[in-house]
Image (cartoon, rainbow, N blue to C red):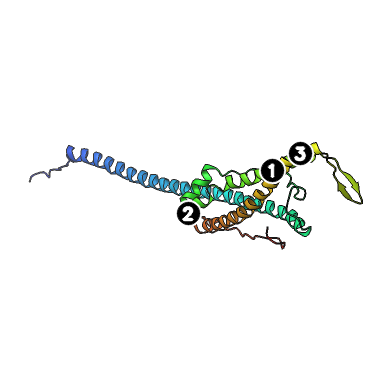
Amino acid sequence: MAEPTLVVTQPSLAWAVFSVIGGSIIGAVSSAIISYLIQRKNLSAAREQRAEDRKNMRRATGYSILFKMIKLASSVQNLRDALQVSVELAREQGRRPTWEVVQPIGPPTENIHFSAEEMALILSLDDALFNQMAALDDMHNNTAGIFNLYGQKREALTSRLGAVEENGVLTTMVDRATAEWMAPRALELNGIIQHMIRSSTEDTETAWGALFRLREVLEAKLDIRHRLERRTPAARTI
């Protein structure tokens, strides 16, 4: 009887190599997929953060120009209202608003400037509003400059004059030479007053119209909500 034979099989060399290489490939592919998913998630989070940062920067710029416009509109209206007091006084006295009645508006009004970033934001939101606002800071500064100039020139004129008080009334006596010196300067001051009346009245309406439109655009486009209330004096318009 033949002895049983024990046969031991060995895996082929090719299969062993394939197993090693295949495992390496599968592991590498899995790692690559995981890395890709992580990187994609990080990129998405970075995009969202950049979008949020950009939104916050635009809102900050929006608030900046809104507050400047509030200051601008209030400034020109304050100039107009202060001038109106003198104009009303002249009317009560049956006189024209001339340099003898119209008092300087002090202290000097500061200039306002829109930045390039602020105007670029407005242009990106509403080009019609951009056109409406583009020159408003120059408009304000010119009008404020006229008021400041009036105060300086009036002070230069009155500093040459003396006055005598009697029963609470100041009386100024001038000789012929002083009167001749005063005449062209008084004429200039009265011309400036008419310019002040015209520009402050027109600029007030222009500025407030632009401000209310700006508030509407910022609320619609950037969700910036700010309540505005315009208060006007009870006196007659000038």
Residue that badge 2 annotates: 128
Percent position (x, y) of residue 9? 16, 42
Q: The residue tagged with tag 3: helix, strand or loop? A: helix
| 45 relative position to 63: left or right | left
101 vs 109, nearest the viewer: 101
Residue at figure coordinates x 60%, y 54% from the top left: 202
Percent position (x, y) of residue 165? 90, 46
Residue that badge 3 annotates: 180
Q: CA distance from mark 1 to mark 2?
A: 38 Å
**Which of the marked residues, 2 or 3, is nearer the chain's N terminus?**
2
Q: The residue tagged with tag 1: helix, strand or loop? A: helix
Looking at the image, residue 222 lies above or below residue 142: below
**Which of the marked residues, 1 or 3, is nearer the chain's N terminus?**
3
Residue at figure coordinates x 74%, y 55% from the top left: 85
Dot 2 surroundings within 10 Å: few (below 14), some, or many (20 or more)? few
How many discs mark residues in the rendered view?
Answer: 3
| 59 relative position to 48: left or right | right
Q: CA distance from mark 1 to mark 3?
A: 14 Å
Is residue 134 among what the camera can see? yes
Residue at figure coordinates x 33%, y 43% from the top left: 32
User: CB of mark 1 within 8 Å of CB of mark 3?
Assistant: no
Residue that badge 1 annotates: 188
Looking at the image, residue 31 lies above or below residue 230: above
Question: Callout 2, which amino acid?
Answer: Ala
Question: Callout 1, which amino acid?
Answer: Glu
